[in-house]
Amino acid sequence: MQNLFNQFHIRPYVRFILAWLALSPAVANAYVGPGAGLTMLGSLWGLILAIVFVVLGLLILPFKIMRNRMKKNAADTAVDSEKPQEKTSDASTEQNSTADSD
């Protein structure tokens, strides 16, 4: 076989193309029924939506983390601003409780 190709001086890429054409089917007769087609489309939509939700979730995650940190910082500053008032009220209740016990 090698002598045949060398005799006609066929280049390697032409050999590949000829082999591919000889081994590939001429016509693909295929029929997908309505039940199988709808099942395939439903699965495909489910897969596409799952990928979209994963990508959106990954894009939204940093913003959710920032929002939660901002809320936590706001709550911490609100608690910090109220703490001095609570300390004075706690101190006065402690004094009252010691005075009542005497």
Image: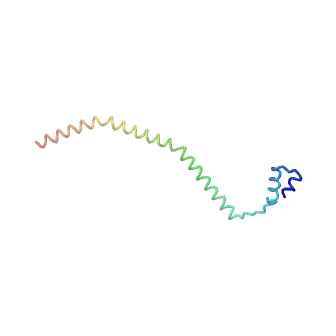
| Residue furthest left as drawn | 102
Where does the image place residue 78, in percent across and percent down from the top left?
36, 37
In the rendered image, which quarter is residue 95 located in? top left
The C terminus lies in which quarter of the figure? top left
The N terminus lies in which quarter of the figure? bottom right
Q: Is residue 72 left or right of residue 57?
A: left
Render colour scheme: rainbow
Count of numbered badges drawn on the protein: 0
In the rendered image, which quarter is residue 24 located in? bottom right
Which residue lies at the image location 83% right of the left edge and 55% below the top edge?
Answer: 18
Q: Is residue 55 left or right of residue 76?
A: right
Along the viewing direction, whichever of 47 and 13 lies nearer the viewer: 13
Which residue lies at the image location 67% right of the left edge and 61% below the top edge?
Answer: 38
Along the viewing direction, whichever of 40 and 5 lies nearer the viewer: 5
Q: Is residue 87 left or right of residue 14?
A: left
Q: Is residue 74 left or right of residue 23?
A: left
Where does the image place residue 73, in percent across and percent down from the top left?
40, 38
Where does the image place residue 11, in percent across and percent down from the top left?
84, 49
Which residue lies at the image location 33% right of the left edge and 36% below the top edge?
Answer: 80
Along the viewing direction, whichever of 55 and 16 lies nearer the viewer: 16
**In the picture shown, does residue 59 fall above or below 23?**
above
| Residue furthest right as drawn | 8
Which residue lies at the image location 72% right of the left edge and 64% below the top edge?
Answer: 33
